[in-house]
Amino acid sequence: MYHPLLTDARFHNSLFALDRLIAEQVRQTQCRLCHGNLHQSHFPRKPRGVPEDTHPDYSIRFSYCCGTEGCRKRFTPPSMRFLSRKVYSSVVIILIFLLKPETDDSRIETFNTLLGTTLSVETLRRWRHFWTKDIPQTHTWKRLPLHQILSQALPMSLLSLFQATGKQSLIMGLKLILPLTAGIHLFDVPFHLNDRK
Ligand SMILES: [Zn+2]
């Protein structure tokens, strides 16, 4: 049910569109340090594990800088596509753990064949650590009821939180972890996105 989303350019483009909305919300705010106006300062990323026919601007990471001389603080909005500084797309970092058969080697092989990537088992294991050790320590995760039980089965349990399935539950899961996607290190950013249907 989730597998086809890895190569679904329309699905990836819908995440790109949501990122535009999020970025627009941030652009309309002011610098949190000096209340200066924010200026566009997007930068390119080189995301891996993304289908070839996504939007031409898909690799742009939306970002803003304070316009005040001497401040110039950068504000990079949360993202549905980019999970902090990780190179692979958020979609991959969740869905690879749902691929069958379930050994790490077979998942890697299936994935690399599907998307022409060179993902390694070591990276997959780092992501597992990220899900099961780092995410449970965050305020975003600890706010959830039953978070301790759910932590053991991350990231699958993230998708099982919602009544929806497939594309819808993945989008809801990505929205839930949005506060963890911005900045250099994993941290909780106060952020609210209206749940547009
Ligand atoms: Zn400023």
Image (cartoon, rainbow, N blue to C red):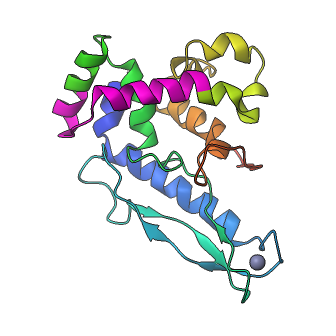
Give the total of numbered labels: 0
Judging depth in this view, the residue of 100 and 1 nearest the camera is 100
Taking the magenta stretch, the answer to whether it contains residue 129 is yes
Q: Is residue 150 visible?
A: yes
Judging depth in this view, the residue of 30 and 33 nearest the camera is 33
Left/right placement of residue 100 relative to residue 149 reads left
Quarter placement of the N terminus: top left
Left/right placement of residue 131 relative to residue 74 reads left
Residue depicted at 23% across the width and 16% down the height: 106
Residue depicted at 37% across the width and 66% down the height: 57
* Residue 8 screen position, x and y as percent: 31, 41
Q: Quadrant of residue 69?
A: bottom right
* Residue 155 screen position, x and y as percent: 52, 23
Q: Is residue 197 visible?
A: no
Taking the magenta stretch, the answer to whether it contains residue 131 is yes
Quarter placement of the C terminus: top right
* Residue 55 screen position, x and y as percent: 34, 60
* Magenta region: 111-133
Left/right placement of residue 45 relative to residue 191 reads left
* Magenta highlight: main SS: helix
Judging depth in this view, the residue of 167 and 32 nearest the camera is 32
